[in-house]
Amino acid sequence: MTKGSFLTFEGIDGSGKSTQARRLAERLRAGGREVVLTREPGGSPGAEEIRRLLVEGSADRWSPETEILLFTAARRDHLEKTILPALERGAVVISDRFADSTRIYQGATRGELRTVVDQLHALMIGREPDLTLILDMDPALALSRGLARESGEDRFESMGQDFQDQLRTGFIQLARRFPLRCRMIDGNRDPDIVADEIMAVVERALR
């Protein structure tokens, strides 16, 4: 059995996940906890190499089936090299995205592939977070934020507004399916208010 706590942030592109994940990590560290802040795709050297294949380039660069395989390969390396070692030594692992993103981005919105996503997850990953915080935000606002970053990693944002709308619906349905693990957080509010609510939820979970 692992000793640490595994927390994930999910939500559509531009919803504030990365910012809130960093803020949570800072607050937990200030309270004396060891925290490993990581992300997907990525989070380990091998997974970061795969990340570039997934988030850069044209929207039609990969088929949904190929994306699922690439994400699963990156996640397996991330799990082996970063997540499990940190949990074993008792750290709090905070990941900006994990398997739920693949369930929604490829499994729920890009073809009838959810069964494939779940089967691969069971075979190759076999781990769920202890707590998942889903940042819910108006898709139009989130999309404008994501594109404004001009990070070069905007392949999914380039798929447009309809795609973002589908993603939001998928995350809402996910929260309903896994109510014990997932918490919906209204990301349309002031970031300080959002951060305070997240901290309160996490403190209860870590008791």
Image (cartoon, helix red, strand yellow):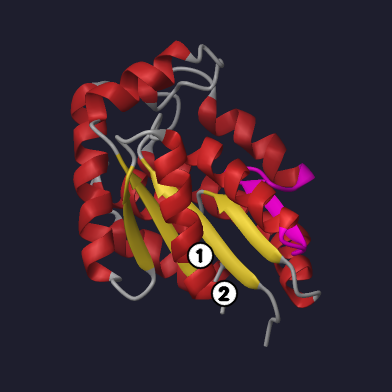
Task: State the extent of the magenta-drawn residues as a range.
Answer: 31-45
- At x 42%, y 56%, the residue is 133
Quarter holding the C terminus?
bottom right
The magenta stretch spans residue 202:
no
Q: Are marks 1 and 2 in contact (CB under 8 Å)?
A: yes
**Label 1: few (<14), some or many (≥20) within 10 Å?**
some
- At x 68%, y 55%, the residue is 78
Mark 2: amino acid: Leu
Please provide percent x and percent y for residue 89.
Answer: 81, 74
User: Relative to residue 88, is residue 59 drawn left or right?
Assistant: left
User: Which residue corresponds to mark 1?
Assistant: 202
Element marked by disc 2? helix
Please provide percent x and percent y for residue 167.
Answer: 26, 41
Mark 1: amino acid: Val
Residue 18 drawn above or below residue 127: above
Choose between 194 and 6: the one closer to the eye. 194
Give residue 119's quadrant in the image: bottom left
Quarter holding the N terminus?
bottom right
User: Relative to residue 139, is residue 71 drawn left or right?
Assistant: right
Residue 46 drawn above or below residue 75: above
Choose between 177 and 61: the one closer to the eye. 177
